[in-house]
């Protein structure tokens, strides 16, 4: 559990909203309204007019039902027995997962629409109203922006660094572009400035750095300031000082910074005022003067 937090007033909030547009005319078929857009977005670049990987095209109803070189990929009525469904539900690490090449996998709702369509007979004529249980897809909503480059092509390099530096680099979620979390909690005493320097090659993949109780100092913070995709940094009980914090103000995406039980004071915090995304700052046990009205 994090200790009592202190939120400094005056930091900017980055707020945004988008409109979700999702209207479907009653007469459009389920295939046209739901299935074709999913295949267009995720599959047609490799299975369409330009490329026909595995001699498979997925850019028309007829082509989908015709299947690939090796045969049918959709078995009407049987999702689990359909090669198309099997390929899109494999784990991200599986060589056979579709789409390939580290492209974002289908969302749960997209997969569910495909499943219902196959179970319902892979029909060309059924309409949206025939699938009351199908989750709606907000077709015009942009995909979640990537937080970091896909880590999967670097998996072996990441594993080697973990072994050498006694740290962990854990995917933040199942989305491979959600970035990695640097964990040191199992042996914080082994993580120091040189370990941070050694992580430079994978730094763009790291979105959170958990460095509490490590031997990181101001010199290590200079290295951290080049990790441009960082959203959260925990420096609880480290030797960082106010003098060392200024370089962190380069981190345009940093939202959360934990400085609990450090020697940081007001000068250090004022260096962070220009950070556009910073929303949470933990200063318990520091020498920073709390803003008026904030106890402790
Ligand atoms: C980046 C390129 C690429 C994308 C995008 C892609 N595929 Fe593929 N697909 C391939 C390649 C290459 C193969 C052949 C190798 C293999 O079978 O794994 C293949 C094979 C397949 C097969 C096996 C065909 C057979 O021989 O039985 C299916 C089914 C398939 N893809 C479905 C999909 C679906 C569905 C999507 C979208 C969700 C998709 N693919 C997106 C490259 C791609």
Image (cartoon, helix red, strand yellow):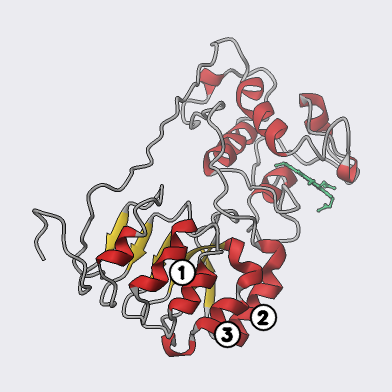
Along the viewing direction, whichever of 162 and 120 lies nearer the viewer: 162
Q: Residues within 10 Å of mark 3 (few under 14, many from 20)?
A: some
Query: In the rendered view of the protein, which quadrant contains the C terminus?
Result: bottom left
Residue found at x 76% / y 25%: 61
Give the numbered dot on residue 209.
Answer: 1
Q: Quadrant of residue 30?
A: top right
Mark 1 lies on a secondary structure that is strand
| Quarter of the figure with the N terminus | bottom left
261 w.r.t. 39: above or below: below
Residue, disc 2:
160
Residue 16 left/right relative to 112? left
Q: Residue 292: where, in percent of width, then height?
A: 11, 54
Choose top left, top right, bottom left or bottom right for residue 113: top right
Label 3: which residue? 165
Q: Nearer the viewer, residue 143 or 217?
A: 217
What residue is at 85 percent from the left and 39 percent from the top? 56
């Amino acid at each position: 559990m994090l200790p009592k937090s202190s939120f400094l007033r005056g930091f900017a909030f980055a707020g945004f909203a988008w409109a979700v547009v999702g209207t479907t005319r009653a007469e459009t078929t389920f295939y046209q309204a739901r299935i074709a857009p999913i295949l267009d977005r995720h599959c047609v670049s490799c299975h369409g007019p330009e490329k026909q990987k595995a001699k498979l095209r997925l850019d028309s109803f007829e082509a989908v039902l015709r299947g690939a070189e090796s045969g049918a990929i959709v078995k009407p009525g049987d999702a689990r027995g359909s090669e198309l469904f099997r390929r899109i539900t494999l784990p991200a690490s599986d060589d056979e997962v579709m789409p390939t090449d580290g492209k974002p996998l289908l969302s749960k709702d997209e997969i569910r629409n495909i499943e219902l369509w196959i179970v319902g007979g892979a029909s060309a004529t059924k309409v949206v109203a025939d699938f009351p249980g199908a989750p709606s897809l907000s077709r015009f909503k942009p995909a979640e922006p990537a937080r970091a480059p896909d880590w999967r092509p670097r998996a072996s390099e990441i594993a080697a660094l973990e072994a050498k530096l006694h740290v962990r680099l854990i995917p933040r979620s199942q989305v491979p572009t959600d970035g990695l979390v640097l964990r040191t909690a199992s042996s914080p005493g082994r993580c120091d400035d040189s370990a941070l320097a050694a992580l430079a090659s994978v730094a763009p993949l790291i979105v959170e750095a958990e460095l509490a109780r490590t031997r990181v100092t101001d010199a290590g913070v200079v290295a951290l300031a080049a990790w441009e995709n960082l959203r959260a940094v925990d420096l609880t009980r480290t030797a960082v000082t106010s003098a060392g914090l200024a370089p962190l103000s380069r981190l345009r995406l940093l939202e959360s910074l934990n400085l609990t039980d450090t020697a940081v004071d007001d000068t250090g915090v004022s260096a962070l005022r220009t950070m556009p995304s910073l929303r949470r700052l933990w200063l318990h046990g520091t020498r920073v003067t709390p803003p008026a009205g904030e106890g402790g």
